[in-house]
Image (cartoon, helix red, strand yellow):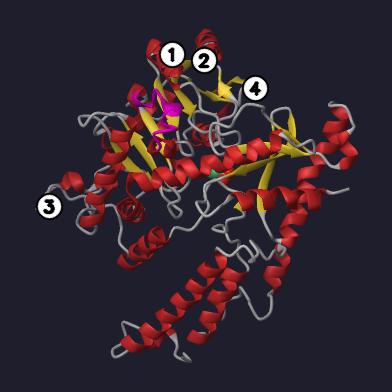
Amino acid sequence: IIISHSSSDLLPTEGSEEASRHFLQEIVNILLAYMCKLFKRSTKVLDFHHPHQLKEGLEGFTLELSDQPENLEQLLVDCRDTLKYGVKTGHPRFFNQLSSGLDIIGLAGEWLTSTANTNMFTYEISPVFILMEEVVLRKMMDMLGWSNEEGDGIFCPGGTVSNLYSVLLARYHFFPEVKSRGMSAIPRLAMFTSSHSHYSIQKSAAVLGIGTENVLLVKCDERYVGKMIPGELESSIASAKDRGLYPFYVSATAGTTVYGAFDPLNDIADICERHGLWMHVDAAWGGGLLMSKRHRVKLQGIDRSSSVTWNPHKMMGVPLQCATLLVRKKGFLQECNQLCAEYLFQPDKHYDTSYDTGDKTIQCGRHVDVFKLWLMWKAKGMEGFESQINKCLENAEYLFDKLKNRTDFLLVFESKPEHSNVCFWYLPHSLRNLPPGCERDKKLHAVAPKIKAKMMEEGLTMIGYQPLGNKVNFFRCVFSNSATQREDVDFLLDEIVRLGHD
Ligand code: ABU
């Protein structure tokens, strides 16, 4: 079908149903073709171009905007090109990020959400989605082990914002006057989190005027995958008190970003109880393991937390974005954040206005993130999520076992990964006979970036790297895509060897 109309010939223009159907059908065809290719191993993960090349325009694809309207045919070409030059994060050989994969049901949910194009702030305009949010959040809170009498939550734009909420709530819990009087009315606060925690905890301190200097990074056990050492937390709290600071908040991590470590939640909860501190658990990455009977033991003690971050767009494979903040104290999100804007949250509406959840948040408009998760949960049940999560961890174990037996690779930590993160160095020939130490480290630091650059230029697979603490650049392989198989793990290692050969 040749579509030569312009966008003004589509709905809501009268008599344009057929043209609109044709246009959208063409879009669906483009997306379906993309998806079918995406899961084929012969397809590249990316077709890399430098920013200046994309800006200059490629094969007729231009980012520039014109004053004249383009016809629909051109828009279809633009859609195809946009996907062509993007990164196929759903490809079975994409190992670069914690969120990956492409779930067809989740995608359908996203399409429906965009079609509904509504806002989560009031029941008035989102009756179904608001009630769905309540159902899904309740289910997640049940999984944390919170009773029906406790618990509240909200979908947030990513784990960083969920973590920000947790600090905001904790501060309000101890100093409600801060809401009207500001930081000058309260003592100098101190927060605690592990040295392996996500940078969003420090960012929250910066945003909320607490100051990054007042986030005390607690030492981790480096020999055993980067877990917070409870004794170090205890002494850090004591020394902060000695220095006149007011400790109020601890963020434990369930699934650190790089190593995938789980902090000892029960030990940390004991300390928080002893010192009367708010205990947050950043389970953005690790929360999904609650779905697995085999792996949920790693989050033991999460029921004792005051708040939890859990991102279904990571381990549960829900399309981006889908992140939550769960709070133990009922009604507290509303109390902390409400400003009762009368143009939106009229108290004299004819329905139960406790379902106008918008004033619980620091945003005004809020995207509908719940529907795709609700639909996926319906489609898979808990069992479906469980088996997809177990499979990701089995892939990690498979990679770990392979690396253990290789002399050209070196594991960053020797113990079996707790999550689906596997961290390792590749040792090119020239480094294999060098003794461990500064000289080797200097050279090793350059290896992963060089391999990654070639990998992106060739586009057959993708994996991330980073330094951490005193460890020079190493690869981090993460599994969250249910399409990934063992053959893809084998391919990744072969590819690193091929690109890293010297
Ligand atoms: N906290 C965002 C996760 C980034 C990553 O994919 O490593």
Instruction: Say what secondary structure mark 1 lies in.
Output: helix
Point out which mark residue 222 bears. Answer: 4
Point out which mark residue 271 bears. Answer: 1
Identify whether 352 is placed above or below 118.
above
Q: Earlier in the sequence, mark 1 or mark 2?
A: 2
Ligand 1: quadrant of the figure: top right
Q: Amino acid at mark 2?
A: Pro
| Residue 39 at x, y percent in the picture | 55, 63
Residue 338, located in which quarter of the rendered image? top left
Q: Earlier in the sequence, mark 4 or mark 2?
A: 4
Point 44% across, 25% down: residue: 184
Identify whether 147 is placed above or below 22.
above
Please tell me which residue lies in front, 363 or 140.
140
Disc 4 C-beta below 8 A from ligand 1 = no
Instruction: Say what secondary structure mark 2 lies in.
Output: helix
| Residue 142 at x, y percent in the picture | 28, 34
Please tell me which residue lies in front, 30 or 216.
30
Reading the image, the residue beneath label 3 is: 349
For the record, the magenta segment spans 292-303
Reading the image, the residue beneath label 2 is: 230
Point 67% across, 56% down: residue: 461
Q: Are marks 1 and 3 in contact (CB under 8 Å)?
A: no
- Discs 3/4, front: 4
Q: Are marks 1 and 2 in contact (CB under 8 Å)?
A: yes
